[in-house]
Image (cartoon, rainbow, N blue to C red):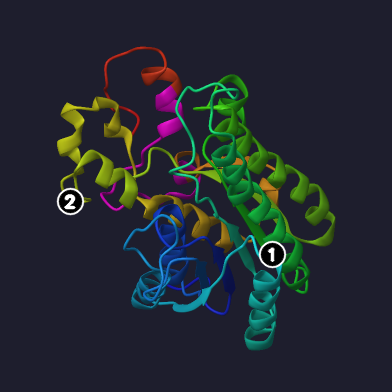
């Protein structure tokens, strides 16, 4: 089917840029109606102070073949989230896919700085943005999602449960945030599974996000120019790759087999047969363990 998600309604919470934008666009490409939320609009920016907007994302969803609907929302504000879900209920009477991709912590964590030296206000703000927002959104959105059987909840994080279990991730606050999202997917699976819905945790690999491209001084069309400085960046993937992972899950009539699992874009690409935009299938988390963390020279042969 060219539009396997036609008639389905999705909420991508945190879709301004990065993985959230890629997920929203690919859900649109599969025919879904996608509610796009975030704090940065064409009229006002969040503290990120970046140019990407939720209107831009919604336009891309529509251009891809779906229907993008913009709803500016601060997911730390329960009243705003309740209003958002009420609007979806009024306009669509259903919610089939909830993607919790709210993050907002790029400027708040400090690499390899112990908790007693890390800026406390920034660390606590990171936890609120990365964890509390997901809880608020699930609290208000799940009753609507449960109106119809077969709903899917995707908790987007950084790292698989296996990798994060054995690996210190950046700092106390970052590590805690990403582990919390993994555990939220596990808990939601316990609560949703008996009620006919599915919850999973999903991680992209090394992402060619707008922020990452800017940090490396490259664009999506010449990102390989960064490899001279960061050779392992060769395993990176576009945000559309993880978007195709979500679209594949949402279109799978047997998606409940994944309930409670920690998944990655690379592992699902081999399961469902989709590729990244360049036709490759990056398997970043296997590469990290077997090549990068093992101290081997960068070589993506067999990993994409």
Crowding at mark 2 (Cα within 10 Å: few <14, some 14-19, many 20+): few
Residue located at (46% from left, 65% from top): 24
In the displayed structure image, the side of residue 265 where residue 146 appears, left or right: right
Answer whether residue 142 is visible to the viewer in this image. Answer: yes
Q: Picture coordinates of residue 289 (x, y %)?
A: 45, 21
Q: Picture coordinates of residue 237 (x, y %)?
A: 34, 43
Q: According to the image, label 1 marks what residue?
A: 151
Q: Which mark is residue 221?
A: 2
Residue located at (64% from left, 55% from top): 133
**SS at mark 1 in the image:** loop
Q: Which mark is residue 249?
A: none
Q: Can you tell which of label 1 and label 2 is closer to the viewer? A: 2
**From what the image shows, is residue 275 above or below residue 51?**
above
Q: Which sits in the foreground, 160 or 281?
A: 160
Crowding at mark 1 (Cα within 10 Å: few <14, some 14-19, many 20+): many
The part of the chain drawn in magenta is: 269-288
**SS at mark 2 in the image:** loop
Residue located at (42% from left, 25% from top): 288
Q: Picture coordinates of residue 293 (x, y %)?
A: 42, 17
Residue 136 found in image quarter: bottom right
Residue located at (38% from left, 38% from top): 206
**From what the image shows, is residue 83 above or below residue 222?**
below
Determine if the magenta segment contains residue 236.
no
């Amino acid at each position: 089917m060219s539009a396997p998600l036609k008639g389905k309604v999705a909420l991508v919470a945190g879709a301004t840029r990065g993985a959230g934008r890629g997920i929203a666009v690919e859900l649109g490409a599969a025919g879904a109606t996608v509610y796009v939320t975030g704090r940065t609009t064409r009229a006002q920016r969040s503290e990120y102070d970046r140019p990407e907007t939720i209107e831009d994302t919604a336009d891309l969803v529509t251009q891809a073949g779906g229907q993008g609907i913009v709803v500016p929302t601060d997911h730390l504000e329960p009243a705003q989230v309740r209003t958002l879900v009420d609007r979806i209920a009024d306009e669509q009477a259903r919610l089939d896919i909830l993607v919790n991709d709210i993050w907002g912590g790029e400027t708040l964590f400090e690499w390899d700085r112990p908790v007693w030296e890390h800026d406390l206000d920034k660390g606590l703000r990171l936890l609120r943005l990365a964890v509390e927002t997901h809880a608020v959104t699930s609290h208000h959105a799940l009753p609507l999602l449960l109106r119809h059987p077969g709903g899917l909840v995707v908790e987007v994080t950084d790292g698989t449960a296996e990798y994060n279990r054995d690996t210190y991730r950046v700092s106390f606050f970052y590590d805690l945030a990403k582990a919390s999202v993994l555990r939220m997917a596990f808990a939601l699976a316990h609560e949703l599974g008996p009620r006919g819905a599915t919850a999973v945790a999903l991680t992209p690999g090394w992402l060619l996000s707008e922020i990452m491209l800017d940090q490396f001084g490259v664009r999506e069309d010449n990102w390989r120019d960064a490899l001279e400085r960061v050779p392992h960046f060769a395993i990176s993937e576009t945000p559309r790759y993880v978007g195709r992972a979500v679209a594949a899950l949402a279109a799978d009539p047997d998606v409940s087999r994944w309930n409670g699992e920690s998944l990655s874009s690379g592992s699902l690409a081999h399961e469902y047969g989709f590729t990244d935009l360049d036709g490759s299938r990056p398997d970043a988390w296997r590469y990290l363990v077997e090549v990068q963390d093992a101290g081997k020279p960068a070589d993506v042969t067999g990993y994409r």
